[in-house]
Amino acid sequence: MSGLLHTDDGCGIAYDFRPVDGRPALLLSPSLGTTMALFEPQIDALADRYSILRYDPRGHGQSQTPAGGYSIDRLGRDAVALLDHLAIERAHFVGVSLGGMVGQWLGYRAPERLLRLVLANTSAYMGPPAGWAVRIAAVSEHGAAALADAVIERWFTPEFRTAHPSRVDHARAMLVRTDPQGYAGCCAAIRDMDLRATAALIDVPTLVIAGARDPATPLDHARFLGGHIPGAALVELDAAHLANLEQPYAFNCALTEFLEAE
């Protein structure tokens, strides 16, 4: 089922929920500049094993775009609101990049809503803020298309871009269609985020997935999370920033092995 949830601040959040009787909920949260379509390779592999809930973050896809900057706290509360709306008491959570930042917030602010937590190609801190100010100014003036070439180089390795141009074009299309205000609003959330001190407070079984060739959230960012979240496991994949698209089989194997561990 698909729908539009209106949050407590009036923002409509578009979602897609595919319940399967007797299967646990799996909440998927995408990267900056993408939509719920980011997870198509996971839907294809996991649809019969989980009740999958995907959504477009505010300012992205079919969700509405409030004015101004957003915050990780606001994005996290959007995710909790989705669980409440669909009467899902607890769910597995998988977040990629920005989605992984939301996952970190949930891990220490709402651990009672989580079964297991997967943080993919993400970071606890992506400073300095000045770099995000430049990106916000660029997208606000020229739109997301102006950033596309540079972003695609971070999202995928050169080999993948050459071998799979149609998949790269699909990802690029998600990016260039992103509302400039929504992209800038989420950039502000990343600019102002520092979750390093709260990593040790995450009290949920956690898997960190890293791209060994990720220039956006490099391997040392993943190793920080793996070393500071109590009991966290770390898996490294031969991929750049969107490992779930570049290495879907390896990503899905790591995911299911972790989620289904006793």
Image: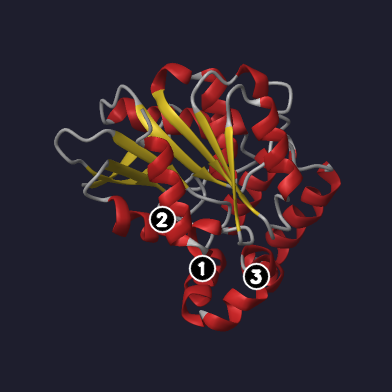
Residue bearing mark 3: 157
Q: Where is residue 127 in the image (x, y as percent from the top left)?
A: 80, 42
Residue 89 in the image: above or below residue 60:
above
Task: Compare residues 258 and 222 and report the one nearer the observer.
Answer: 258
Q: Hey, what amino acid is under mark 1?
A: Ala
Q: Is residue 151 left or right of residue 78?
A: right
| Residue 12 in view, yes or no | no
Q: At 47% from the left edge and 19% from the top edge, which residue is drawn?
A: 111
Picture residue at 26% right of the left edge, 31% below the top: 86
Q: Nearer the viewer, residue 138 or 18?
A: 18
Give the residue type that dot 3 points to: Thr
Disc nearest the viewer among 2 and 1: 2
**Residue designated by label 2:** 39
Residue 167 in the image: x percent, y percent? 47, 74
Residue 45 in picture, x, y percent from top left: 31, 56
| Callout 1 touching callout 3 (CB < 8 Å) | no
Quarter holding residue 15: top left
Q: How far apart are marks 3 and 2 (CA)?
A: 19 Å
Compare marks 3 and 2 and give the one earlier in the sequence. 2
Q: Where residue 195 sits: x, y (%)? A: 69, 28
**One can see residue 205 in this view:** yes
Per the image, label 1 sits on a secondary structure element best described as: helix
The residue where tag 1 is placed is 171
